[in-house]
Image (spheres, helix red, strand yellow):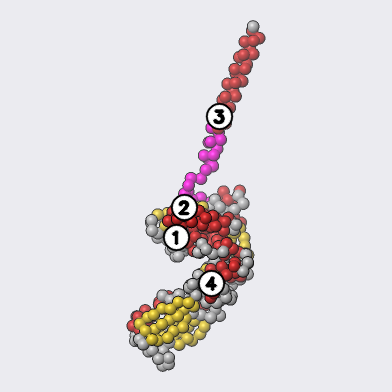
Amino acid sequence: MNNKKKIIRWAAACLSSFVAVVVLVPAILVKTTDSTHTPAGAVPQSTAELQSQNDASSLVIPVYLSKEKKIQSVQLEAYVRGVLAAEMPIEFELEAMKAQAMAARTYIVRRILDQDFSNMPVSGAWVTDTIAHQAYSTDDDLKARWGAAYVSNMDKLSRAVNETKDSVLTYQGKPIEATFFSTSNGYTENSEDYWNQYIPYLRSVPSPWDVQLSPRYRETTVLTAKELQTKLGLRSAVPASASGSGAMKVIETTQGHRIKNISIGGKTFTGRDVREKLGLASSQFQWSWKGSSLQITTFGYGHGVGMSQWGANGMAKEGRKAEDIVKYFYTGIEIDRAANLLKGKSF
């Protein structure tokens, strides 16, 4: 009888210990998960956590939403997806979108490494959602824009981002100035011909695809003589004749076939000056007078430096891959991993 009581007591003790383990183990697991979880929207203070991963996808980007006047913090690849949605038409070829995704990711990684959080309306954000940095669309924006097509469009965006995950464009081991624009005039522009700064990988290359594909290849702007005078800050009206000291005359063109310097009303301007002051689509333009009105026809859309988006789409339509596209428009670059560049850095 005594032996039976001992056996019963031993079995009860074992059962009690087993129940305790069953109860404690989930609690331990929950505690461990909570202790390593990064709250949504938290901005990491260093990249130490990236060192144990194969990519930089856990990096969180604080984006200032200009309309809502608030900061939204999103992980790196989600930010790249939002930029891709805002900067490139969803109808573009996948390989062109992948090239754009790499350019977008390179832009923000370079900004982080340079600690360049300038031109910000508030502290705490790294970029805005405007073209002052890179245009960016939230998921809510995209749902409102696309409606029933939201899911399929997001799938395409996600594929472009995922298939280039962690990829950035570098020159001599550093992220490049991955500038891009909509439509070329048939050529891209050397950096120094628009920004007065020589950048070795921003060289003029032919982009013949734009003329056939882009709806913005050719545009015409009409100005009165008075508007031209006012916008250019001239003392007197520009004569409509093709000759004379005050007539419009191209002085020099760039390697990219745009206007480098032009004389208007006896005053010399750069092509960029005229484009920006008159609100023109491009710095390659022709003009003609119709009575007292000046008709200016532009070729291309944008500054012309770096990757032409419509050119990239044309290359993709011909079967070129994203790597081919970026290496064509950015001379002498390599493709690296964001995690390699961010490793060990603090910010």
Helix or strand or loop: what does disc 1 sit on? loop
Q: Which residue is mark 1?
A: 129
- The vertical placement of 260 against 30, above or below, is below
Report if residue 96 is visible in the image: yes
Of all residues, the one furthest to the front in this rendering is: 148
Of labels 3 and 4, earlier in sequence is 3
Q: Amino acid at mark 4?
A: Leu
Where residue 309 sits in the image (x, y, percent)? 53, 68
Nearer the viewer's eye, disc 4 or disc 1?
4
Nearer the viewer's eye, disc 3 or disc 4?
4
Helix or strand or loop: what does disc 2 sit on? strand
Where residue 6 sits in the image (x, y, percent)? 63, 12
Q: Amino acid at mark 2?
A: Ser
- Tell how many labels: 4
Estimate the spatial distance between the alpha carbons at disc 4 and disc 1, rounded to whole Å.
27 Å
Q: Which residue is mark 4?
A: 213
The residue shown at (49%, 75%) is 217
Q: Quadrant of residue 234?
A: bottom left
- The vertical placement of 300 against 79, above or below, is below
Q: Residues within 10 Å of mark 4 (few under 14, many from 20)?
A: some
Q: Quadrant of residue 68?
A: bottom left
- Look at the image and give the residue range highlighted in magenta: 27-46
The question of residue 335 being in magenta is answered with: no
Q: In front here: 347 or 216? A: 216
